[in-house]
Image (cartoon, helix red, strand yellow):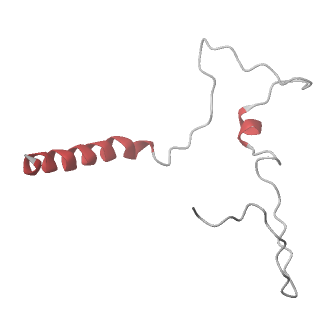
Amino acid sequence: MTMMRTPLLIAGAAMAALIALPGCGSRQKLTAVEGVTPVPPAYGAAAAAGPNELLQPSTQSRPERNVELRRKSEARADDPFDLPPE
């Protein structure tokens, strides 16, 4: 019974890949859908954000990294949550 299902599973996976493949890498300009009301502006904003503004990540979602290198080895501070496994 499993021998009969294996080719069907492989064929199903191949069909799913072929169906999903055309959507990969598609880059089109964002446009509003007809008949849908636009997004209201955020509280305190003068106007609603456009598509390009909405695609830019905020500072909170992509904070800057602090990559200060250590010059000397330092002892770690005690971590009360570093518990041994039970």
User: What residue do we see at 33% from left, 47% from top?
Assistant: 17
- Residue closest to the far front: 86
Is residue 64 found left or right of 2 in the rendered image?
Answer: right
User: What residue do we see at 33% from left, 40% from top?
Assistant: 19
71 versus 26 height, above or below? below
Query: How many circles with numbers are drawn on the protein?
Result: 0
- Rendering coords of residue 47 (x, y %): 86, 24
Is residue 35 found left or right of 10 in the rendered image?
Answer: right
User: What residue do we see at 83% from left, 59% from top?
Assistant: 64
User: What residue do we see at 11% from left, 49% from top?
Assistant: 2
- Rendering coords of residue 32 (x, y %): 63, 23
Image quadrant of residue 77? bottom right
- Residue closest to the far bottom: 72
Give whichever of 67, 12 is nearer the camera. Answer: 67
- Rendering coords of residue 67 (x, y %): 82, 72
- Rendering coords of residue 54 (x, y %): 74, 36
Is residue 25 found left or right of 13 in the rendered image?
Answer: right
Give whichever of 13, 80 is nearer the camera. Answer: 80
Give whichever of 70, 35 is nearer the camera. Answer: 70
Is residue 57 found left or right of 84 in the rendered image?
Answer: right
32 versus 80 height, above or below? above
Indicate the quadrant containing the C terminus: top left, top right, bottom left or bottom right: bottom right
